[in-house]
Image: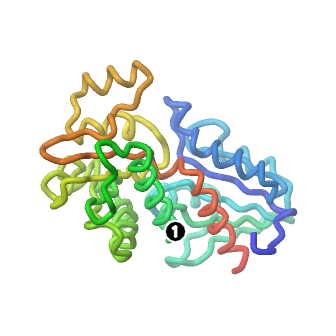
Amino acid sequence: MSGESFSDAALVLLGHGSSVDEDAGATVRQHAAELRRRGVFAEVREAFWKQEPQVKEVLAGLKHGRVFLVPIFISEGHFSDDVIPSELGFSATAAGDLRIQDRAKQKFFYCKPIGTHEKMADVLLGRAREVIEQFPFPRAPGPGEITLFIAGHGTKQNPSSRKAIELQAGRLRSLGIYAEVQAVFIEEEPQIGDCYTLSETKNIVVVPFLVSDGPHARQDIPIMLGESESTVQKRLKAGRPGWRNPTEKKGKMVWYSAVAGSSPAVVEVILERVREPAKG
């Protein structure tokens, strides 16, 4: 990591998790395994808010001088920015300030979530590129022939959720690679199903800006894109994706990529989030 030494440090990847779906933590475990393999840190652990191992238990077992916590969240929302740091004893800070806590001979750093980092734009671009390369039929359209939709969750309960999606869509739009880049949402307007009327191009690529390949990614978004629930369920039961790439719907050719959060490139974003408080 650019010459920095983290041989005295522990890294904790913090996920939301789920009390009913153990697979909700798969993405966090994937990235933790890769970071352990690289051997940059003395220890790398995964921890969750809603499933085992829980974050307070993981932190209590760490003995290293420095501990970096990286929230594997898309937005600086209610959980990642308020609930979790408060429960862990990190005091409230002004926007953009580092959260640092001293405990006996340890120093804890609560990093910013991965989803708002500028390098996540590269992750989203990679997902869009991959799905076209993997499924070029009937022919691979060029980026200038494609409208790229960044599909986020969104929630009216917290405007920060929407801002994170729109932030990355704006970054990608400014690059001028695709004919259009727009943000669409599961729970807010414009909704994912609106992509057909929002796009002026025949070709559409939808990248789910989600952490994990959960029910939203596997079934809700394919249904919102116009696939029948029975067809999606039939495909999932057969071990196939809920969306067939590409599918022609409403006069458009639609590609639907893997979720952004599980991209191997996210590991680099995690390392960048650790560098920020380390330098500070």
Relative depth, front residue between 155 and 276: 276
Q: Residue at x 16, y 59 (%)?
A: 198
Q: Residue at x 44, y 61 (%)?
A: 125
Q: Is residue 265 left or right of residue 195?
A: right
Location of residue 5 with respect to 23 vertically, above or below: below
Relative depth, front residue between 222 and 21: 222
The amino acid type of the residue labelled 1 equals: His
Q: Is residue 273 left or right of residue 153?
A: right
Residue 61, percent from left and from top: 80, 47
Location of residue 103 with respect to 213 vertically, above or below: below
Q: Say what secondary structure mark 1 lies in.
A: loop
> How many numbered badges does the structure rendering display?
1
Q: Residue at x 64, y 36 (%)?
A: 52
Q: Quadrant of the C terminus?
A: bottom right
Residue 56, percent from left and from top: 68, 48
Q: Is residue 118 left or right of residue 273?
A: left
In the picture, residue 77 is in which quadrant?
A: bottom left
Name the outermost residue toward the front.
139
Q: Which residue is mark 1?
A: 117
Q: Residue at x 82, y 54 (%)?
A: 39
Q: Is residue 103 left or right of residue 163?
A: right
Residue 175, percent from left and from top: 38, 75
Residue 201, percent from left and from top: 19, 59
